[in-house]
Image (tube, rainbow, N blue to C red):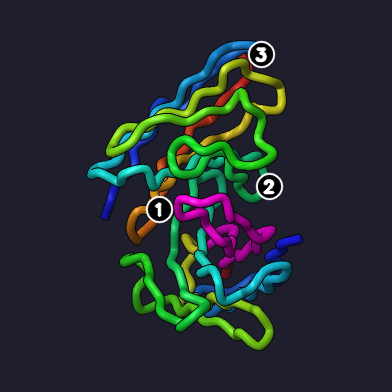
Amino acid sequence: QVQLVQSGAEVKKPGASVKVSCKASGYTFTNYGISWVRQAPGQGLEWMGWISTYNGNTKYAQKLQGRVTMTTDTSTSTAYMELRSLRSDDTAVYYCAVIAAAGPFDHWGQGTLVTVSS
Amino acid sequence: DIQMTQSPSSLSASVGDRVTITCRASQSISSYLNWYQQKPGIAPRLLIYAASSLQSGVPSRFSGSGSGTDFTLTISSLQPEDFATYYCQQSYSTPQTFGQGTKVEIK
């Protein structure tokens, strides 16, 4: 079965960086791009960006440009999201996902809680 | 960027009620509209894709309609397990924006 398994919770200080991993299994990794979505405590879903697992092309949310980098390692079917210069308002659950683009193939990781606190 | 506006932001309903949630896009997105259900502490679950197609395994009491800019999610007879937050999302262009969510609570 399709699975996206994310790395564990992180606690970071303001100004630090975090890198979250997302290991895919159960499907051909390079057939579907990976999106990253975050959810601050008690808030809605925020689309952060997308990476093509085929050629590495990326699209980022404008508000995160310059602070976020998404990469993939096709040899291990793993996607990564690095966020730099962390602030307290980056505290959130971060999800990787294959998001349906007019089709039924839609799968999400379990989420990774990133807490930014001094 | 395409803005997605959901209404209402919350509603109270009873088991067996018919519930309708609307989502409006700031420009046409054809039928590139997903509906998700989310319960606390759990990743979102896809209910409807392409505006009106029911995801496999989702009960038939859920239905979606609309195209262009105006979309609707309907739950024909609310069940106890349906109390959750619902989000629309456009997959027409990046950023693939979400609506702000509709929380369905027990009346």
If the image is split into quadrants, where does the C terminus of chain A sit? bottom right
Distance from the alpha carbon under mark 1 to that under mark 3: 32 Å
Per the rendered image, the range of residues in magenta is A91-116
Output the chain of dot 3. Answer: B
Label 2 or label 1, whichever lies nearer to me, is 1
| Rendered view: B25 above or below A105 | above
Could you classify mark 2 by the number of other residues whose Cα lies within 10 Å: few (under 14), some (14-19), or many (20 or more)? Answer: few
Q: Nearer the viewer, mark 2 or mark 3?
A: 3
* A58 over A75 or under it: above or below: above
Please, what is the three-letter code of the amino acid marked with disc 3? Val
Which sits in the foreground, A6 or B71?
Answer: B71
Mark 2 or 1, nearer chain start: 2
Mark 2 vs mark 3, CA separation in Å: 23 Å
Q: Crowdedness of circle 3 by 10 Å Cα count: few (<14), some, many (20+)?
A: some
Q: Residue B15's mark?
A: 3
Q: Is residue A16 visible?
A: no
Give the residue displayed 39% in from the left and 28% down from the top. B22
